[in-house]
Amino acid sequence: MRAWAVVENGAPLQEIEIPTPEPKGTEVLLEVTHCGVCHSDLHIWEGYYDLGGGKRLSLKDRGVVLPLAMGHEVVGRVAKLGPDANGVAVGDLRIVYPWVGCGVCDKCRAEEDNLCLNLRSIGIFQNGGYATHVLVPQPRHLIAPGSVDPAVAATYACSGITVYSAIKRVMPLPPSEPIVLVGAGGLGLNAIAVLKAMNHENIIVVDVSAEKRELAQKAGATRTVDGSGSPEEVTKRVLDAAGGPVLGIVDMVNGSATARFSYDALRKGGKLIMVGLFGGELTVALPVMMMRMLSLQGSFVGTPKDLREVVELAQRGKLKPLPVSTVPQSQANEALMRLRDGKVTGRIVLKAEAA
Ligand SMILES: [Zn+2]
Ligand SMILES: [Zn+2]
């Protein structure tokens, strides 16, 4: 198979030829038709996460091996089944749930794969969709896109379930209660769409870019807030827009500055859900956490059930698709560089030549 792979961290992706895997046991081989280019691919490509204070979390130390075909927002056609794989047939179009674990622990068995201690995520710890083929461990990781445009359906595997499960963590809240979304990139626009699909009415979006704020407004944000300037200034603007401190904030940037202004805008009993991978750190006064009963919760992607629920929302026509632009798979590197340079609104999706 052909792959547009990370051969060296931070260097351009290279088109390489690697042996096409043979599906064993319950494994399923798919021919990739679509693959989203996610912001976290930039971190995988660079080879580390920024932990703040000059510290880095190396992906090599976490078990990422090069060369690697990244890509965890994959849609493909079933090409070959392992002898024990049931429930799909050759030719079926499926979304790949990429956050697969060991497959045998309690969490994996309960379909909470993303809580497995031995994650083997597709596109991170094993080859993903920046390739002509992808190997999936079990048929239950394959979800039918139905009538949903496969280019849009691909994005549900990461950005879709990430925002869906993060929003579920601040819910239930009354429809008129302000919910603040930090970041109006691919995740932020998907989050607006999910909140609208849940009939939520008060959505406040923070972003540093005027262009992205305008997109958020068009996507259905009730109000937008300029995220530039000091965290103190942004907190004030958020409080103004929300009419006071806020119960639910989903920070899809999750950097030192956004975490600061978000935390400081929380109401008593408020929850800050931390989703992005921008990096940095947050200092909290412990007595304040306790007296104000605040919650800080990290949220990492979602479960296969979340993916099925997001697809169902989309099938019912409730979920407005985020803007996607498709480019040929062979332009994976250019797509990644455009994302790095902040030139992407919505999502770029790589499309196979045959698709
Ligand atoms: Zn992603
Ligand atoms: Zn497991």
Image (spheres, helix red, strand yellow):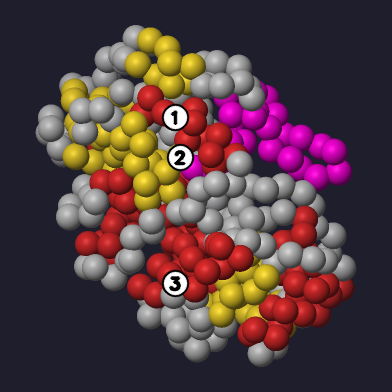
According to the picture, the residue beneath numbered tag 3 turns out to be 218
Q: Which class describes the residues within 10 Å of circle 1: few (<14), some (14-19), or many (20+)?
A: many
Q: Is residue 290 visible?
A: no
Going from the N terminus, do you reach mark 2 or mark 1 first? 2
Residue 291: give x, y in percent of width and height.
81, 80
Residue 78: give x, y in percent of width and height.
19, 31
Which mark is drawn over residue 332?
1
Q: How far, Cα to Cα, is label 1 from label 3?
A: 28 Å
Is ligand 1 closer than 8 angstroms to the Cβ of mark 2?
no
Answer above or below: position of 304 versus 252: above
| Residue at 63% across, 69% down | 206
Q: Nearer the viewer, mark 2 or mark 1?
A: 1
Q: How far, Cα to Cα, is label 3 from label 2?
A: 23 Å
According to the picture, the residue beneath numbered tag 2 turns out to be 37
| Residue at 79% across, 52% down | 281
Is ligand 1 closer than 8 angstroms to the Cβ of mark 1?
no
| Residue at 87% across, 68% down | 285
Magenta range is: 38-65
Going from the N terminus, do you reach mark 1 or mark 3 first? 3
Name the quadrant containing residue 272. bottom right
Q: Which class describes the residues within 10 Å of circle 2: few (<14), some (14-19), or many (20+)?
A: many
Q: Is residue 185 visible?
A: yes
